Amino acid sequence: MRRPVTSNPRPGVIQALLLMLAGMLPVMGTLTMLPIMPVLFQHFSSHPHVQLLVPMIVTLPSISMALIAPLAGMAADRLSRRRLLMYATGIYALFGLMPLLLNDLYAILLVRLGMGIADAFILTTANALIGDYFTGEQRSRWLAIQGGVGSVIATLIILCSGVLGQFGWTGPVYLYALAIPIFLGLLFFTHETAARPDEETEQTQTAPFPRRKMAIIALVTLGSSVIYFLEPLQISQVFSLLGMQSSSQTGLATAIAGVGVPLGAWFYGRLARKPVEKQLLWFYGIYGTGLLLIALAGNQAAGVAAAFVAQTGNGLFIPLMLGWVMKAIPSAHRAKGMGIWHACFFLGMFISPIQVTLTTGVTGNLQETLRVFAWLTLLAGVLLTASRRMPRALSLSS
């Protein structure tokens, strides 16, 4: 078990910002490669399996995160979360920059796999440390800020990657060097933590892992994340169906819709004191309405407005779920809980496009498919409201 450390000063803005930036590294690992996919296909066009292997440059880190995150969480509960985060950040920088020295597609995939393993440790330890460092309203505030700022950073990453991609497929790889100053910041400005007396009693610190509560969180996460990824993964195709021809138009429309994410994160700050079932009800209501409007959109302006509503729901979802895990799982098991949560979240990302493809085979149209999922999302909100047992099962205080 981790050795308790209680003599360190209380964390503040610097520590919160460092942990948020560290938590963005796995997102950057995936987003950095997206704008240069055509460049990658062109560069490796002579490879016999280019159509299969090039997309794996993007997907391999996510698969690694889904598979490794629970194990990373278990390790973080037994060892130093801070040290694991620092080591993982250093490994991330090393493996992230290594493609600059490589030109073999299989070797590149291997280092991307290694970077994905580092991603799993970064996600679990960074979010667990936010839960360790902050409690109550302060924690909710930082989770809301993380959700809002994260969308802005993600947009900047895509823009920078697109610009650097003009210098070749290795141009965006240099963005991974940003992990180096984050590593140094973690080294000099963070410290070990222990469960706080005002957050947990001695009994809860030594309590066994709450399997039933975690199982409920995992099931809700898996189902909700399949829905959550519908808009970000499918909206560009919807825009194309509505007549957007150029990538610049699609990018601008996506950026406008993305303004909803920080709005949703801000809204979470207003809901943070509410029971989690009410928070989920707001997510299902807002996001389901957004999906339904996307399905009904008949022109580009309506499509962008509908996507904005859906993105507002998405901005609520991430801090909602992270806050639920942090409060529901005792600090001694928090990293394990985070690992299971991230595994379910990324598994949902993997399932979501498959489910869309299968459903579209029945409906015959992407917007009709989104209409089906919109009604299912709204139905989930209705069932959550109508059920008498479900709120007790989901309650943070149960």
Image (cartoon, grey):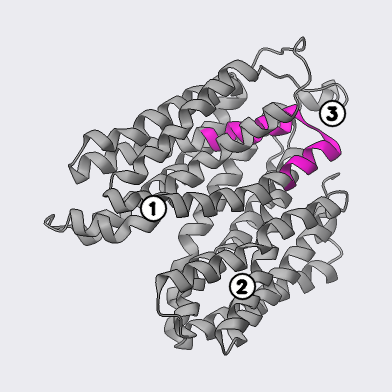
Residue 19 pos. (x, y %):
63, 32
Q: Against 178, is 310 above or below? A: below
Q: Quadrant of the C terminus?
A: top right
Q: Earlier in the sequence, mark 2 or mark 1?
A: 1
Closest to the observer, 212 or 162: 162
Q: Earlier in the sequence, mark 2 or mark 3?
A: 3
The residue singled out by tag 3 in the image is 199
Q: Quadrant of residue 223?
A: bottom right
Q: Is residue 139 magenta?
A: yes
Q: Earlier in the sequence, mark 1 or mark 3?
A: 1
Q: Secondary structure at mark 1?
A: helix
Numbered range of the magenta stretch: 122-144
Which mark is in front, 2 or 1? Answer: 1
Q: Secondary structure at mark 2?
A: helix
Q: Residue at x 53, y 28 (%)?
A: 182
Closest to the observer, 328 or 125: 125
Q: Is residue 295 magenta?
A: no
